[in-house]
Image (cartoon, coloured by chain):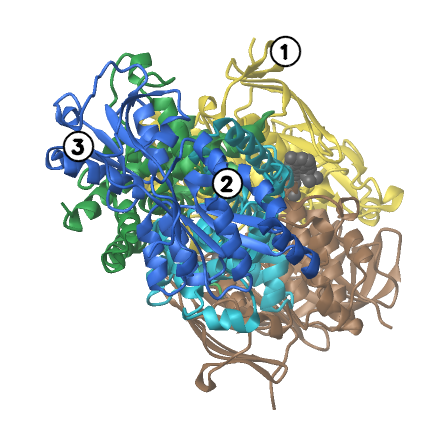
Chain colours: A brown, B yellow, C cyan, D green, E blue
Amino acid sequence: MTALLDLDLTLPLDRFTLSVRWRTEEPALGIFGPSGAGKSSLLESIAGLRKNTSGRIAFAGRPWLDSGRGLRLPPEKRGVGYVPQDALLFPHLDVMGNLLAGRRRAARRPARRMSIERVLKVLELAEMGGRPVETLSGGERQRVALGRALCSAPDLLLLDEPLAGLDAALRRRVLTYVLRIQVEFAIPTICVSHDAAEIRTLCREVAVLVRGGIAALGRPDEILIRPDILPVASEEGYENVLRGRVALREPSLLYLDLEAGPRLAVPAEDEARTGDEVAVAVRADDLILAARRPEGLSAQNILPATIVEIRAASAAAGADGPVQVIAALGVLRTPIVATVTQRARQQLDLKPGGQVHLIFKTQACRLLATRRTR
Amino acid sequence: MTALLDLDLTLPLDRFTLSVRWRTEEPALGIFGPSGAGKSSLLESIAGLRKNTSGRIAFAGRPWLDSGRGLRLPPEKRGVGYVPQDALLFPHLDVMGNLLAGRRRAARRPARRMSIERVLKVLELAEMGGRPVETLSGGERQRVALGRALCSAPDLLLLDEPLAGLDAALRRRVLTYVLRIQVEFAIPTICVSHDAAEIRTLCREVAVLVRGGIAALGRPDEILIRPDILPVASEEGYENVLRGRVALREPSLLYLDLEAGPRLAVPAEDEARTGDEVAVAVRADDLILAARRPEGLSAQNILPATIVEIRAASAAAGADGPVQVIAALGVLRTPIVATVTQRARQQLDLKPGGQVHLIFKTQACRLLATRRTR
Amino acid sequence: MIPAPVVPLLLSLKVAALTTAAILPPGILLALLLARLEFRGKSLVETAVSLPLILPPTAVGYLLLRLLARNGPLGSVTLGFDLDLLFTWKGAVLASAFMSLPLVVRTARVALEEVDPRLEAIGRTLGMPPMRIFFEVTLPLARRGLLAAAVLGFGRALGEFGATVIVAGNIPGRTQTLALAIFNDLQVGRDREAMLLVAMTVLLAFGAIWSVEGLLRRRKRGVQ
Amino acid sequence: MIPAPVVPLLLSLKVAALTTAAILPPGILLALLLARLEFRGKSLVETAVSLPLILPPTAVGYLLLRLLARNGPLGSVTLGFDLDLLFTWKGAVLASAFMSLPLVVRTARVALEEVDPRLEAIGRTLGMPPMRIFFEVTLPLARRGLLAAAVLGFGRALGEFGATVIVAGNIPGRTQTLALAIFNDLQVGRDREAMLLVAMTVLLAFGAIWSVEGLLRRRKRGVQ
Amino acid sequence: ALATVAGAVAADAGPAPEIMVYAAASLRDALQDLAPRCEQALGVRLMFNFGASSDLARQIEAGNKADVFFSADEGFMDRVAKAGLVDTASRLSPLSNRLVVVVPADSDLRIRTAEDLAAPVIRHLSLANPEAVPAGRYARAWLERAGVWDRVRDRVVPGVDVRAALAAVESGALEAGIVYGTDAAISRRVRVALEVRAEDGPRISYALAALRSRPWLPVARRVVEWLAGPLAAPIFERRGFLRTSDPPEPYR
Ligand SMILES: Nc1ncnc2c1ncn2[C@@H]1O[C@H](COP(=O)(O)OP(=O)(O)OP(=O)(O)O)[C@@H](O)[C@H]1O
Ligand SMILES: Nc1ncnc2c1ncn2[C@@H]1O[C@H](COP(=O)(O)OP(=O)(O)OP(=O)(O)O)[C@@H](O)[C@H]1O
Ligand SMILES: [Mg+2]
Ligand SMILES: [Mg+2]
């Protein structure tokens, strides 16, 4: 069977050679890794912008590069929408001109065409259509670059830290929009990001690049947990992502029925309606374990679970360091991770097979994204 | 008395006029605000790069701009170290050449001169001195720009999102270094950032810019808590910052004596030694309140406190929304904020004057920065 | 019989404008090749393009005359198509074009080399084929330099004397451009008349420069 | 009497090199003013600089001759000292310099206009005064274009005939450059000798172009 | 009679025949004065191409687009004749000129003979290129005949044409020069220090001929005759040209 994306490429860089083999069916991909790992170089190779890339690239069954057979599709034949890390707007065009740069391709693909007005609105560029791009702010440039790619009706979106220059609120709004595009138009996406939450929201599979090689590959919630990757991924530690359906909506609270079984209280969001599928993040660092069900706490979520495994949370810290307690939740035995100190482990006598209560606050839950059920 | 920084300036921009009045003694300043608010424009005005700025700028008692008197100090006389948002490296120089671009000024200021080797090392550019800057990765460029400013022995550092392109681990290391420079060399700093943690670490005073005007001004822990600013500041909600001194060091835990009094267990960091002053962040969302001292929890930190005030956490959510419980900790009555749901407030019957226990995990504490006591 | 000075003025305008128009497309193309391709013998090609610059114009004129002569290598071809180049204004255009080419190519090359290839690459990811990239990205980005190249070419065509006088002759009312008329007046000692023609040339050049200057004026980010 | 062809070769090399050296500093300065300042009458200044381009070279030669005449506005009688320019190789340098100036200025201007003013601004925040910025930021960034300007100036100086022959004469062994020698041979009908001199000129130009091409070669980010 | 014939031609052929005259640049003013009369007299239209005789000769060879060639010396006419393009029957030498020695107007040099040009005070001598330009060749011939050429040849500053040689003297940078009397007459910045007597100098003669294989050759011949004829003579004389001592006659 042909994979959606099939990479087996090599690109010599300054201090190492980028060498990536990646075959996947997943349309929502992430690339993660420390600065200088080769993330942007990989995107540029896929877009066809690095001519000394060798090996194979195939997308949706169509070969884009096959150095063995001397095949190299030029960038304009690959149909990607590439958002470079440094925006690279056309300085001779105004904002609207930049957004329209890919209009000819979009015109040939009516099914993929997005409304310019909508893009302008969601990216909060509505007043700026006529602005020369030279005087735009950093975040504005970033948004125009994203809009330019979206308006070109691409087959594959290549996003290189598309939200890096945006404030938290705007980032959340744009992220939701990109996610919706990804789903509605069914556009496969490869997103480079340093932001674990961004990756977890947009991607179903993530490749961790380190010094040009794939150090880890898999589902974000499996990969970003790993003690060797965690420090790079986040200043804030690992986040559990729980999926469920909105069962009840109060003005400021949502009650979710988790796939795993139990019901969860999370802060309400305007977007979420009853019946929606949602994803919720809870940090491993925020989960408190209790031996017995506690009383008189402000925390609204207290879920019983069974410990499956206990392991060191950090490769470096050794035997004394914090531990990850992996517990199975509900009937589906969904794994959920809590990080606790050795001392707590001893005090509570935690061990595999034991019963615990997971305690966490409503406020500690973060709604990642909502998908309307049609 | 003359202030350290005294701004009263006006700069017409596209959709609004930047108009800032800011007088402060504080050497560690932050600028915060949504994309397109005028943050970069303000920094450029201070650096002397926007010639249509009018009004007054004075630094350390020296006037830099006084349009009334027709005075305008050229940029090279202002002695700033400016890190622009888009790095703007000199393309005709290699990495080392860029770092040395300000060496002549540095040579005139031996007290301020930083070791190039050290800068290269901390910014993890050690192998790259001879690299042309055109092929650097995004994060590498950003670091070289930072290094170039640091090596020029500035009187005032102007940082425009200096860490935006870096992964979490690297960001933490660089941040610690910048903080150390700020303290050791006593270099006043103005830092633009979208990252609340960055602002809280580097800055003692923050101005929130919205549409060219200062919407709020004050200590980061007072300002970033505000319900109107919170959503912009952070995806993750407000963080308390507690300051204290390392009392005891275990391999994987540090015990801190807080200024406020009680002792806290936090995850160990290589950098921290006994006696060091440290700052620790704990999110308001992570604090659990308990009416009585609970038993059998994995959480290691359980601090008694007195409720001072209870108010709505979000302007939008109204009466049903989550509330901020502000509690006084220990003898200094240091304010600490916990966000809880209305339901929890009712269940626990929280009200001002009441006694509560603040519960939070070791892992929920994040060491922001360490300062060695000499 | 003596032509009003307006005749050479119009002729000069026509010759210079046509020269510029004729020289720009191949000049820019050549500049593009030199700017973008690395090949062996590049310096040779460049030297070849520069020949009309580095040789005395009269020599170039003689060479062209030789090539286009009735019995010259290109004479029959020319006659076959009845291009009728020698001693006509078309010959003046041809001579000026040769003389302007090196200026246009080198200046255009500078402009094209300054165009960021990454912007062209981005254009391609948006689905523009190379031709469209050239017209919608490269050309507009290089526009200041290309205009400068055009001005140089136009100016050179205005002032061209040495090659033109050989190839086109100095026929009042037909091939006597301003430059030739000025030379002619100076030669017979009519300095006053020559000055009038000089003034007209300057006016023409000023017009060209002024309008290009207007095209070039544009706003930039307000840095000091 | 006929000089070994090596004499005009050396003379041409000397004249062209000195012309280029003499013309670059003021040419770049002028280009900088035109690139950076907006002032009334800018087009006039540009036209003035372009004069030697748009007028027939001989006219420029006569004008210079008139100016430098013993009792002319810039002559030895007026100035009180004898520069000894007329009919010496210095005069040839002077004439070539005038003729090259417009090419150098316009090409250098294109190069300088493409320099990002924000990079200069960053340099200033690092404490570099404007002079240092110019030498350490602007010049190196504009270097490709400035080299092109130098090549154009050098080439023009090599090929300059019309003005040089008036101001410097055509004195074999003293002011007879390659261009003048070629003209001379052609005029007398010694076409074979002229071809030899043409070959030498081409060689000289090739040398200049080749070495500049080497200076220009540099690596870029590997985009397609 | 001539006029009638020409008039008839004009009347028959509709548009007047166009005669292209390639003429030495120094003849320009005189020819432009004569042109209207000649056109009226012969019912033709005259076009001119003015240039250095050497260039004109080359152009005739290359393009064969001239009907009449008016060369500043016999040599270039010979050259065209050798290429078989001259209608030898029509060839005439109607005009002559005189050489003069000029010095800058403010110079007090006195020059009475060719010998004086060899004096050390004359460090430069301005000539039109003695190898190529007719005026220079004549000057050299005069100096050779006077036996001073070998002594002055290293002081010679060769100009591209007579006009350049004159301008060089005008500049004051050169002590003396030898040019045509016609050229010296137009400059106020030089003083004629010596007029070379016709018998001392070389035979200066302008060559005029119609050119072959042209459609209007008969008309061109008539133009040649007219220009060499009595109606044109006064105007050439007014411009300082001399009529050749011999009456106009076929060259060979
Ligand atoms: N054309 C090139 N030639 C040589 N080395 C290169 C080239 N392009 C990039 N590199 C180097 O390869 C490494 C990877 O670069 P890349 O831009 O892919 O990093 P990245 O993972 O995107 O980093 P960042 O997160 O900082 O943007 C860097 O060290 C960079 O300096
Ligand atoms: N020279 C200028 N002329 C007109 N408008 C400008 C100019 N420079 C900036 N602006 C506009 O002023 C606003 C503020 O720009 P600025 O770069 O200061 O924003 P910012 O706060 O740094 O935003 P970001 O976080 O996106 O970098 C933006 O809308 C921008 O488009
Ligand atoms: Mg990158
Ligand atoms: Mg900004």
Label 2–label 1 contact, CB within 8 A: no
Left or right of A258? Residue A77 is left
x then y, percent, for residue E196? 25, 29
Find out if the beta carbon at label 3 lies less than 8 Å from the nearest ligand 1 atom: no
Identify the residue at image location x=17%, y=32%.
E155
Q: Are marks 2 and 1 on the same chain?
A: no
Left or right of C204? Residue B227 is right
Relative to the observer, which residue lies in front, C192 or A290? Answer: C192
| Quarter of the rendering occupied by the C terminus of chain C | top right
Callout 3 crowding tier (Cα within 10 Å): few <14, some 14–19, many ≥20: some
Q: Which residue is mark 2?
A: E31
Q: Which residue is mark 3?
A: E155
Label 2–label 3 contact, CB within 8 A: no
Q: Which residue is mark 1?
A: B68
Residue D177 visible here: yes
For mark 1, give the secondary structure.
helix
Mark closer to the chain start, 2 or 3: 2
For mark 2, give the secondary structure.
helix
Chain of the residue that carries numbered disc 2 in the rendered image:
E
What residue type is disc 3 on? Arg
Residue B122 higher or lower than A176, as above or below: above
Relative to the observer, which residue lies in front, A201 or A264? Answer: A201
What residue type is disc 2 on? Leu
Q: CA distance from mark 1 to mark 3?
A: 71 Å
x then y, percent, for residue B329? 64, 33
